[in-house]
């Protein structure tokens, strides 16, 4: 398959996979099958998928670097935007269905409940990332785009803290996400270390180090 067609098929696959949890929620809502507390169910499902897609988007670069899978690179943006879509639905569920736009209560919640503060901060980190994800913005920002997009790691860390702080007893699920994020950050650090060491070597030595020869 030619690379353009493969990229397009992969994007379609990622977008379809990204839409499935939302489609499932819509089916459950239409069939009145969201359980005893539908708002809580929607909050949980959208929060879970926002975090999962965020971590998936962060695993694209490590996969490309570790296994030389260049074809995964275009998925990063699709997965990141899918995470943002679920984070928006999650936040909107909280604002509209849970708090009925009661701004006083919402501000109080954001300032006083530490897990809400962490979730809100994670959401704020994602906003500039989504706003600068278009090709035009990538071109306009040039090299500044890369440090800005490291905010995705901060967003993921805050989202994991948000989850850790909100659970009352069973910490297993948020701890799995915390472990995945630690692994991704560790790999990132490893790549950075390898790159800074290779800068100190001669071009020939650097090439053989980076290719693992
Ligand atoms: C990047 C942004 C965010 C992510 C990734 C995220 C993720 C999550 C996750 C994974 C859960 C737990 C779901 C479960 O128990 O299965 C959750 C729950 C929740 N989140 Fe977020 N969240 C984000 C932002 C926010 C924001 C901005 C708010 C509100 C200001 C918020 C409010 C809540 C609430 C109220 C719950 C349910 C708490 C409970 O069950 O007692 N989240 N979120």
Image: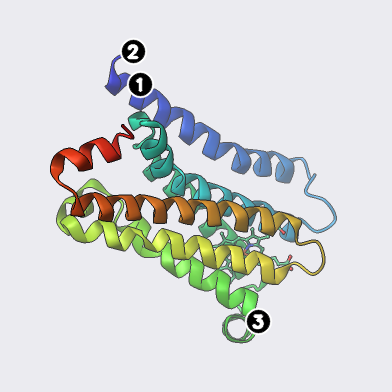
- Residue at 38% x, 36% y: name it: 64
Q: Which residue is mark 2?
A: 1
Label located before the other in sequence (2 or 1): 2
The spot of residue 184 in percent (x, y) is 49, 51
Q: Is residue 61 above or below residue 3?
A: below
Q: Nearer the viewer, mark 2 or mark 3?
A: 2
Real-space CA distance between mark 1 and mark 3, rounded to the nearest whole angstrom? 46 Å
List the single residue furthest toward the right.
Answer: 36
Mark 3 or mark 1, which is nearer the start of the sequence?
Answer: 1
Asked if marks 2 and 1 touch (Cβ < 8 Å), the reply is yes
Q: State left or right for residue 23 relative to residue 38.
A: left
Question: Would residue 156 be visible to someone looking at this image?
Answer: yes
Q: Nearer the viewer, residue 120 or 68?
A: 68
Disc 1 secondary structure class: helix
Q: Which image quarter is the N terminus in?
A: top left
Circle 2 residues within 10 Å: few <14, some 14–19, many ≥20: few
């Amino acid at each position: 398959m030619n690379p353009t067609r493969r990229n397009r098929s992969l994007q379609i696959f990622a977008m379809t996979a990204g839409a499935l949890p939302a489609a499932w929620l819509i089916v459950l809502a239409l069939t009145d099958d969201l359980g005893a507390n539908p708002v809580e169910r929607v909050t949980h499902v959208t929060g879970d998928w926002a975090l999962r897609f965020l971590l998936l988007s962060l695993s694209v670069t490590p996969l490309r670097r570790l296994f030389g899978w260049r074809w995964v690179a275009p998925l990063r943006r699709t997965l990141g935007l899918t995470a943002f879509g679920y984070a928006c639905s999650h936040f909107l569920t909280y604002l509209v269905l849970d708090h009925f736009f009661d701004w006083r209560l919402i501000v109080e919640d954001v300032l006083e409940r530490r897990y809400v503060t962490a979730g809100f901060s994670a959401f704020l980190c994602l906003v500039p990332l989504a706003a600068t994800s278009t090709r035009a913005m990538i071109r306009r920002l040039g090299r500044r785009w890369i440090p800005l997009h490291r905010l995705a790691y901060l967003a993921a860390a805050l989202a994991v803290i948000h989850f850790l702080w909100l659970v009352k007893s069973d910490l297993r699920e948020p701890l799995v996400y915390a472990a995945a994020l630690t692994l991704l950050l560790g790999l990132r650090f490893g790549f950075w270390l390898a790159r800074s060491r290779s800068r100190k070597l001669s071009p020939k030595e650097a090439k053989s180090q980076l290719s693992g020869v």
